[in-house]
Image (tube, helix red, strand yellow):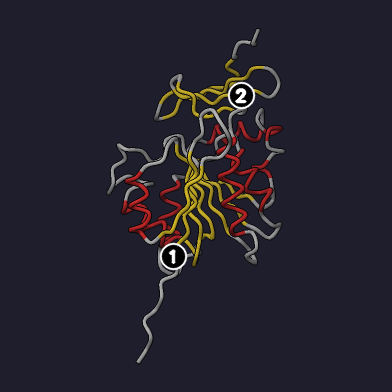
Amino acid sequence: MAQPWQTIEKADTPDGVLELRQRGERDFLIVINNRVLMNSSANRSELFLGEEAAKTVATRPRPRVLVGGLGMGLTLRAALDALPQSAEVVVAELNPVVVQWCRGPLADLTSAAVQDRRVTVVIDDVTAVLSRAAQPGARKFDAIIIDLYEGPHAKTDGVNDPFYGSRALKKTVDALSPQGIFAVWGENSDAGFEKRLAAAGFSFDRQRPGRGGLRHVVYLAQKKIIKQPLQG
């Protein structure tokens, strides 16, 4: 018989009560208002997201990567394992308690990924971090990884969604270095999001990691090279 889940930590947030639940030694859930956000034993798409995005830029001299959403740190761990020691990884996380959990009860899951010397955690909205990087003259990211509990879907506001709308995608393009990578987790594929990616200047590949069962979607989009007109 499976052991019952026990709430070991919880915190009030603007979106509701965030809870960390545990069953056994290494089985964890993060829940908000009784809605499961993350499960430590069901993470193949998150691992694929972090690894594939990082592998694409790993050969650059000093790759700079933004991870939007810390969660349990599993996507971060996968990215770190694929990146060189010269990399710089910025993690944007809204809830300080999530960072505390990743440094405490969840640390063994990821070999304390948040404490890796390459990692800087900022308590901020990832959209604000993107906005700053999109400014002219600002330092750009070689890869931007968005791992949030609601990916693009049919009801996404096609213009104003802060992550997946056309305005946000334009900002993401501006925040990336040449041929930079934009990697996005989603529950399912979304044709509207794909059209917006293409219109914003991305080529992209859609993957469903794993075999059988529920298979989430990972988008790996690359900023296209803008060819300059020949001078006469």
Query: Which residue carries the number 1 mark?
Result: 224
Q: Is residue 103 left or right of residue 156?
A: right
Q: Position of residue 198 (x, y in %)?
A: 36, 57
Q: Position of residue 196 (x, y in %)?
A: 33, 52
Q: Residue at x 64, y 59 (%)?
A: 58
Amino acid at dot 2: Phe
Q: How many marks?
A: 2
> CA separation, marks 2 and 1?
39 Å
Q: Residue at x 51, y 29 (%)?
A: 214
Q: Quadrant of residue 15?
A: top left
Query: Which residue carries the number 2 mark?
Result: 28
Q: Secondary structure at mark 2?
A: strand
Front-lying residue, 158 or 174 = 158
Q: Is residue 112 left or right of residue 222?
A: right
Front-lying residue, 187 or 81 = 187
Q: Which part of the image, by quadrant, shows the C terminus?
A: bottom left
Q: Residue at x 53, y 29 (%)?
A: 38
Q: Residue at x 49, y 51 (%)?
A: 220
Q: Earlier in the sequence, mark 2 or mark 1?
A: 2
Q: Is residue 199 left or right of residue 134?
A: left
Q: Quadrant of residue 16?
A: top left
Amino acid at dot 1: Lys
Q: Are marks 2 and 1 in contact (CB under 8 Å)?
A: no
